[in-house]
Amino acid sequence: MTTRYDSIVIGAGHNGLTCAAYLAKAGKKVLVLEANDRIGGMAITEQAADGVLIPTCAHLLYQLHPDVIRDLDLKVKMAASSLPTIALGSDGRHLKILGETVTALNGADLSAKDTENYVLVMRDLKKFARVLGALLGQKPPHLKNRDWEDTKTLLKLGLSIRMMGRKSMQEFLRIALLNIADQLEDHLENDLLMGVTAMEAVWGTHLAPRSPGSVLSLMYKLAGSLEGTQGGIGIPAGGIGKVSEALEQAATRAGATIRTNTPVKSMLVENDTVIGVELESGEKILAASVASSADPQRTFLSLLGAEHLDAGFTRRLGKIRNRGDAAKINLVLDGLPEFTGLSQQDLAAKLVIAPSIDYVEKAFNHAKYGEFSEHPALEVTLPTVVDQSSAGTGRHVLSIVAQYAPHQLKAGWSDEQRAALGEAVIRKLEGYAPNIRKQIISQQVLTPADLEQLFNVTGGHWHHLEIQVDQLLMMRPLHGTAQYETPVAGLYLCGAGAHPGGNVTGAPGMNAAKRILSRKG
Amino acid sequence: MNKSRYDAIIIGAGHNGLTAACFMAKAGLKVLVLEKNDYLGGAAVSLELHPGWTYSNCSYVCSLLRPEIVRDLNLPKYGLQVIPYSGGGVFMQNGDHLCNYNDHDAHRLELARHSKKDSEAYDRYSTDLMRQCRFIKPLLMRMAPDPTSFKPRDLGELAYLGKRFLDFSEAQMAETLRFWTMSVAEFLDEYFESDVIKAYYAGSGIIGTALGPMSPGTAYVLLHHYMGEVDGNIGAWGFARGGMGSISKAMAACFEDHGGEIRSGCGVDKVLVKNGRTVGVVLKNGDDYYANTVISNADVKHTFLDIVERDDLPEDFVRQVERFKIRGSSGKLNIALDGMPEFPQVPKDSPIFNGDMHFTDSIERMERGYDDWKNGTWSKDPYLDMLLPTRIDPTMAPPGKHYMTVFVQYAPYHLANNESWDGANRDAFAQTVFNQISEYSPNFKDMILHYECRTPLDIEREAGITEGNIFQGELTFDQLLFNRPVPGYAQYRSPIKGLYMCGSSTHPGGGVMGAPGANAAREVLRDLGARQTVRGY
């Protein structure tokens, strides 16, 4: 126990690394502690046995915050930054969506009216999302006991809502908590188009299209931008792990130390202040502040300990919603798959199986009762097609997010259950790519329970916590610990459990670092 | 002057139309109420469909009727008597039951029988719920401010709302924001662990809505049902002696006492509009009546899509009315019983029989019922809200006999495959309900002397409410406060000068509350510059 750090960051996921990089850049002596043997958290690319690269968990980049890219001078080359989405129809007739433009493939049904209305619906959502977008790079404002910055944020927010004009403001206030199904059915008729758009709103959440609040979750997803494109979907060259690597380099360049294979056992607390951490190895490290990118329950209950918190806070902490519904399935194929009605070029897209609102709604019903869906909604990418740099082995990867598969399966996640989930996904794929089963060389099925294990995320939730209105802004993760501070001095949150939340954005890490720096003068 | 000229005409003699009518007559205006049915009350009616039995055909309990209105209209003088009831509970599948006691200690003991932890959480639950009730209550009898307006009155009301909210501690603010948006299942999870206790309280979160207990936003619906007061007890419920029609009758008596005129059997065909101004109405039978003020008690869809000419309205407004959600989600059975049915799993003298009885002992069963609704069929294992008003109010049936009312959730208005409710489906729907009850009461079916089964379609046909939705519109946030019924028209006025709305489609929404009617009357009287009889509560 020799060195004393200014800050310890727990977890070398993209948010932990971002936080560390910002702190180190400000001249602080920073140590990052990662439990796993590698950095990156849920944003990693791993090599399979035969050299092919697999995005183990996250596979798409939506909105890496532009400030993070600029401030940390990140050089992330994108293999694609505006991937189209293709809504797969079971008869080989699909819809291709790029930005607000929908085109029918192979003579799929699509009325001119729907094409026009889709533009209107998405423009509205994007306009409203931009209002929220202004909040992403800031600490969420308190409603009471505000400091000047909070008041400024709230005034700006109020003003930007007012500035939209009366009609837009009315519409914004009306749909803010609406469900996406109603909003789409008001304007569109095409089942396939509504299915894929509704699904876009609920990926990674415990919501279905008819759940109130799903419009907000879509707006939230559209709040940021990727390389200047609002709602852009991208895959970095070399895989999503390149983002984490770039952040790692930024952090080390700025002088931060990163130790992998170094799980933290607990926080050291003295006089109600966190003064450092104790490692599993027994080593104790002191620091003026500790920023945790672990999820809130893990941070407070496992690492800090409930004895340092008041009972009300602990009770509320136990009730935050953090049970994941999304599973990840990675298939390595011996060649390029053939999807009915898709050219090889079309495979460089985000393929979605969510043929109608009702389909998604039915898939969700199972999750409510602790069952996984036999007919899941799927989000499929082929990184080896999109990203030429990762091709060349002749192998191809299907990276699949499958929903809904609840973290707490009533039957319990056993090997049989996991295999059954994998089978359901493959069977569903066969409906669209009939020969796919024969092409599979290896498969990896990660249930939310597996994600919990692999990435130390309580509940195995993609965004650490549900993205719903009662867990956003100054209520994320919960009242009493917004603005990255916690009830215990010296301890901060810097992960996806803090505002603005999940996805690979770096924003929570950046905001937390700024907060820590401002607190310590 | 023409005899058929009035200061104001009210379309529909539902409780809100009558409330508005009373306040306007009290202001000295010449008011005519037109009702399409041969009886008054809309969905607050008492009808004798089986000799000797009075049915509260539609609405069946009185909890939300604003005490300010009862007082100002002096309704007890006109015969209204509300009898509070207590009791109720859940018959469980495992043979046990949960009983709701009025007495606090007894109730906690009963909860402790199911879960000691829940019994301890109960006071915390009540306190938190009451805090939300107190926050919302003063808003009921006020105009919902338009946040997009710069008018002094809107700004003032907004400031009032803001101030009330800022009076909370930050923790309470957070709890309030959460409460308004979360699902009733999650809300109850924060307090209780026992399935049956959660199921008992969750019922109020779904009654009358096309949402399941796990849908976000249902915690607010729970609150909506708890806002009522009987004898000043927040959350207490009661029966109107003689059925719910007694409320309408008392209101009608008050109205006529103040010189008002009511014509029943007079369905309105069209609102007459000249140069963008209301001038009167034409009846289905061709008669016309003239007034520069017309107030519609009908739901917003029926009013603007059926009664008002489309050409008289801005296109944009019509579109917004079209998308207003009034979803049929429930049905109703009224049953004449030859005596008290036996429920062997509960002691004969249990207070359970004096209140709202349920058979749904878990939230999951309730949610599965909602899945059926989503699939376009009525719940195969429905959530029943069953009461025996005659246990408390013997005037509704001959001595020794009983009247039973069963509210059934969920029943969609549109059945899958375009099937019709009429005929076999209605019978099958009734049988589903009978079967559930007789699982717990072996002699129930033998006791039935007569029954009336009302599907959402039947409720629409009779009470005139689109899709038979008991609230004249879903109580989701996109349809509450300044969004109800349509953004920009949430203050009882419409795009046509002189045409107003006063039904449950307007703020603060459904239930036999009277608040929309009183609020609408206040706005009309303001616009007319007449004497204000609706006090600013």
Image: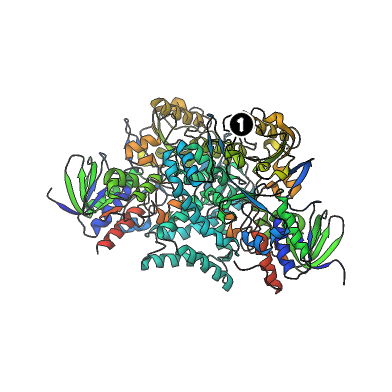
- For this view, does B161 lie left or right of residue A107? left
Extreme-left residue of the structure: A2
The residue wearing badge 1 is: B343
Camera-side residue of A14 and A253: A14
Crowding near the residue tagged with mark 1, few <14, some 14–19, many ≥20 C-alpha atoms within 10 Å: some
- For this view, does B185 lie left or right of residue A21? right
Residue B495 rendering spot, x and y as whole percentages: 69, 65
Among the 4 quarters of the image, the one containing residue B492: bottom right
Camera-side residue of A265 and B29: B29
Which color scheme did the rendering employ for the protein?
A: rainbow
Camera-side residue of A499 and B394: B394
Q: Amino acid at mark 1?
A: Phe
Total marks drawn?
1
Camera-side residue of B198 and A70: B198
- For this view, does A102 lie left or right of residue A406? right
- Residue B409 in view in this figure: no
Label 1 marks which chain's residue? B
Residue, x 69% and y 30% (percent of image)?
B445
Residue B320 rendering spot, x and y as whole percentages: 65, 57
Residue B155 rendering spot, x and y as whole percentages: 55, 70
The vertical placement of A465 against B138, above or below, is: above
Residue B398 rendering spot, x and y as whole percentages: 75, 40
Among the 4 quarters of the image, the one containing residue B522: bottom right
The vertical placement of B157 against B88, above or below, is: below
Judged from the image, the secondary structure of the residue bearing numbered disc 1 is: loop
The C terminus of chain A is located in which quarter? bottom left
- Residue B284 in view in this figure: yes
